Amino acid sequence: MHSLYFEKHFLFFFLLSSTLSGQLKGTLTDSLNNPLIGVSVYIQNSFVGTVTNEEGQFYLGNLPEKKGEIVFKSLGYETQKRPFDVQKTPLDYKVQLREAFISLKEVTLKSDENPANTIIRAAINKRKEQLLKSQSFTANFYSKGVVGKFHCKPK
């Protein structure tokens, strides 16, 4: 009788502790409630993370900490951070990311000369110097039992 009582309580506490081991899930949408695909979702200051699927859903299990901050990040959207505590419920996030408006400084293009011409002239000026460097080279490597130095000369 005592053994059965112990086993039931052990099983109950085991199941309870496994549910509190840290699991987060949720859905990310844009301002029009469309699911966001490929949004990075990760725990701040850790290596635990994932991306959202086609429905904008994510799941994170085996969290390194019981409390922390979850980060939602995607190009073109403002990054959002939310606190989490695995001992409080619900751990099902509904996050709506706002579009980020990015403006660049003014860019002026001159059509006097192709910018590639400057790079090509610099490469031509260094041609002889680079040719001397590439006359031969040596490499040490291992490849399925072949070890040694190989000397190659350009044709």
Image (spheres, rainbow, N blue to C red):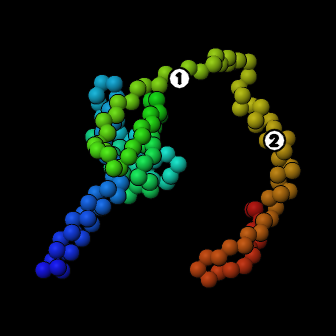
Write down the residue under mark 2. 124
Q: Is residue 117 left or right of residue 40?
A: right
SS under mark 2: helix
- Vertical relation: 56 (above or below) 130: above
Q: Is residue 20 visible?
A: yes
Tell me which amino acid carries mark 2: Ile
Q: How far apart in space, not on screen, are marks 1 and 2 (Cα)?
A: 39 Å
Query: Residue 136's x, y, as percent?
Result: 80, 65
Q: Nearer the viewer, mark 1 or mark 2?
A: 1
Tell me which amino acid carries mark 1: Ile
- Vertical relation: 122 (above or below) 4: above
Residue furthest left as drawn: 1
- Vertical relation: 16 (above or below) 42: below
Write down the residue under mark 1. 102
Q: Which one is nearer the viewer's eye here, 129 or 1?
A: 1
Q: Quadrant location of the C terminus?
A: bottom right
Q: Is residue 106 left or right of residue 92?
A: right
Q: Quadrant location of the N terminus?
A: bottom left
- Vertical relation: 84 (above or below) 75: below
Q: Which one is nearer the viewer's eye here, 4 or 97?
A: 4
Mark 1 nearby-residue class (10 Å; few <14, some 14–19, many ≥20): few
SS under mark 1: loop
